[in-house]
Image: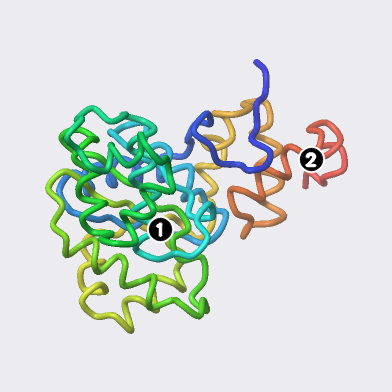
Amino acid sequence: MGCDIPRWPVAGESFQLGGRTWIRAAETLVKLTSAFPMAVLLGRAGMGKSQVAYEVCRMTNCIYIDLTEVGERNMANIAAIVAWRILAKYGGRDPRNRVAEAYRKFGYEGLLSLARGDPAWTLRTALELAGPRVVVVLDELLPSAEDPKFFDVAYILHRVRNMHLPNASFLVTMLPEVYEKIVERIPPLGNFFLHITVQLPDVIPEDEVEEIVSVYCPEKAELARKILAERPDATVRELLLALNNMPSRRYIELTPTD
């Protein structure tokens, strides 16, 4: 069987998700996003948050947004890029929809102009084009707890939650330190987060290493166990990159077996 281990980036819509904990996380998030206006996927960098989010997208009507694509993370830019992705995917089905009209005439700049005037209206109107219910993944919305505009960005979540959008739920990926700061400093959001958060493991469970690796390359499962034995705190990303950079036979020969 051939190997197709992700290189860089190690997450993508064409890759599979392995590991029962990660698959269970995706299934739980699907349930949460069907019942709540927002869900949070928590985990340290490199532990598979993005791949879990892609799996949620495979299981739902979904728009995935990597927020590294957005310059300034403010409500207008978020609303504009969500609208742009929705229109790119579904098109302007309703000719009476003003957001669709702006997109047809002026492209992304037209959407951004609307969003700067009224971001909540732009977001709500765009979501009307996405069908009965859509999950909007906001990946890397807050990449650091030390961001100078941390609270401005965090309050975007507070605002979106309070919009009570009937046909949408937002899945937000988050680092532990970002989550902890929000819970501590913004109590209304923190109390809500307690009910809608799924957390990935801090380390890879030994009994799931083979499950994770086998979706890409079953023949390297034993090598993965050896790497993890030497580096028990390795992330999923680090493990996959190590498997790509190290031939199986050479590593096994150099690794003591006792």
Q: What residue type is labelled 2?
A: Asn
Splitting the image into 4 quarters, where does residue 191 fall? Answer: bottom left
Mark 2, mark 1: which one is toward the viewer?
Answer: 1
The residue furthest front is 105
Residues under labels 2 and 1: Cα distance? 38 Å
Reply above or below: 109 against 4. Answer: below
- Looking at the picture, tell me which residue is in the foreground, 115 or 51: 115
Reply above or below: 174 against 208. Answer: below
- The number of numbered discs placed on residues in the rendered structure image is 2
* Percent coordinates x, y for residue 144 in the rendering: 52, 71
The residue positioned 25% from the left and 61% from the top of the image is 118
Q: Which amino acid does label 1 sit on?
A: Asn
Locate residue 46 relative to residue 244 in the image: left or right. Answer: left
Splitting the image into 4 quarters, where does residue 61 fall? Answer: top left
Which quarter of the figure is the N terminus placed in?
top right
User: Which mark is on residue 77?
Assistant: 1
Q: Which of marks 2 and 1 is nearer the N terminus?
A: 1
The residue positioned 23% from the left and 42% from the top of the image is 98
The residue positioned 64% from the left and 35% from the top of the image is 6
The residue positioned 24% from the left and 61% from the top of the image is 160
* Percent coordinates x, y for residue 181 in the rendering: 39, 79
* Percent coordinates x, y for residue 64 in the rendering: 41, 42
- Looking at the picture, tell me which residue is in the foreground, 256 or 59: 59
Residue for badge 2: 245
Tell me how the rendering is colored: rainbow
Dot 2, how many residues are within 10 Å of its Cα: few (below 14), some (14-19), or many (20+)? few
User: Which mark is on residue 242?
Assistant: none
Q: What element carries label 2?
A: helix
Q: What element carries label 1?
A: helix
* Percent coordinates x, y for residue 219 in the rendering: 67, 26
Locate residue 197 relative to residue 68 in the image: left or right. Answer: left
Dot 1, how many residues are within 10 Å of its Cα: few (below 14), some (14-19), or many (20+)? many
